[in-house]
Amino acid sequence: MPLFQLILIALIQGVTEFLPVSSSGHLILLPGLTGLADQGQIIDVAVHVGTLGAVIVYFRHDLRLALAGLPRALVGRTDTPGARLAMGLIVATIPVTIAGLVLHLTGLDQAMRSVAVIGWAMLVFGLVLYWADRTGAQTKRADGWSLRDALIMGLWQVVALIPGTSRSGITITGGRHLGYTREDAARLAMLMSIPTIAASGLLLGGEVALGVDTGAMADAAIAAALAFFAALLALAFMMRLLRSVSFTPYVIYRIILGVGLLIWAYT
């Protein structure tokens, strides 16, 4: 695959994975908008691995806390902050894992990969994010994340299986609706992405692991590395920006892109 295309794919995935604008929607649109060949599953898996690495590095302290509490969480004990965080991540991941597996096995995930679906999801869920951000209280903090809230945010995350929705965007929407501050809603959404992206990567990676040649592996390694650095920068930028700015700039972008895609799809 040409180096330019690998760079383009990695930058799109890295920048949009953690911003509430839908990385999958942008990647699906890339071949149709540019005329480039579809990158294939091996590159999709690679750039997801890259972004997974970025969120692990950025939230390494929270992840270390969750891992330390995981043994207690697995036996049903949530008497430490780490155990509560680990249990919350487990609970939040279950709904999207089940729903994603069902969609994948039935082929519905491929059936939804259309410009019209992405356009509607961009527009509608951008407006939902705006509503939740404007009306949601800012009284809850990530340290007080309850299992009830984890389950609710996990159910919101299921909606992200619709291309164009944005996994980070819809989980942030759920967090803001529950009353978490902007920064803490984003923090929880990013932590929720770790097991979700890992599960998705394992599913897709298992399907493409056999029969991958050396050239494809080299392309995948380049794409993963580029996506890692792009995602790390985008993540740091968003978390810093949220200290003083709302989600409105992302909503405006989603509305403009969504309307443009719908015009294109229906004309």
Image (spheres, grey):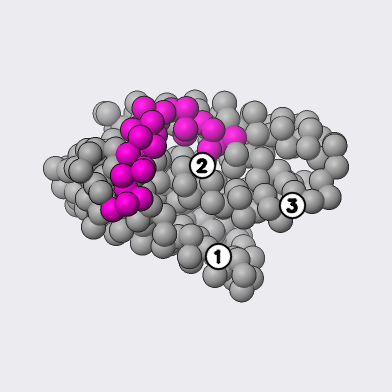
From the top left corner, tell me how far across and down residue 251 is, in percent.
38, 47
Quarter of the image for residue 3 reads top right
Say if 74 sits above or below 250 in the image: below
The crowding category of the residue bearing disc 3, from other C-alpha atoms within 10 Å (few below 14, some 14 to 19, many at least 20), is: few
Which residue is found at the position 64% from the left and 28% from the top?
A: 225
The type of residue carrying mark 2 is Glu
Camera-nearest residue between 184 and 89: 89
Name the residue type under label 1.
Leu
According to the picture, the residue beneath numbered tag 3 turns out to be 208
Kindly identify the residue that appears in the image at 35 percent across and 56 percent down. Answer: 91
The crowding category of the residue bearing disc 1, from other C-alpha atoms within 10 Å (few below 14, some 14 to 19, many at least 20), is some
Furthest residue toward bottom: 106
Q: Mark 2 against mark 3, which lies toward the viewer?
A: 3
**Residue span colored magenta:** 50-76
Is mark 1 in CB contact (under 8 Å) with mark 2?
no
Q: Residue 241 in the image: x percent, y percent?
A: 34, 28
The residue under label 2 is 17
Q: Earlier in the sequence, mark 2 or mark 3?
A: 2
**Secondary structure mostly seen in the magenta stretch:** helix
Residue 262 position, x and y percent, is 54, 62
Quarter in which the C terminus is drawn? bottom right
Disc nearer the start of the sequence (3/1): 1
- The residue carrying mark 1 is 101
Q: Please provide percent x and percent y for residue 234.
A: 48, 30
Q: Secondary structure at mark 3?
A: helix
Q: Is residue 133 left or right of residue 91?
A: left
Mark identifier at residue 126: none
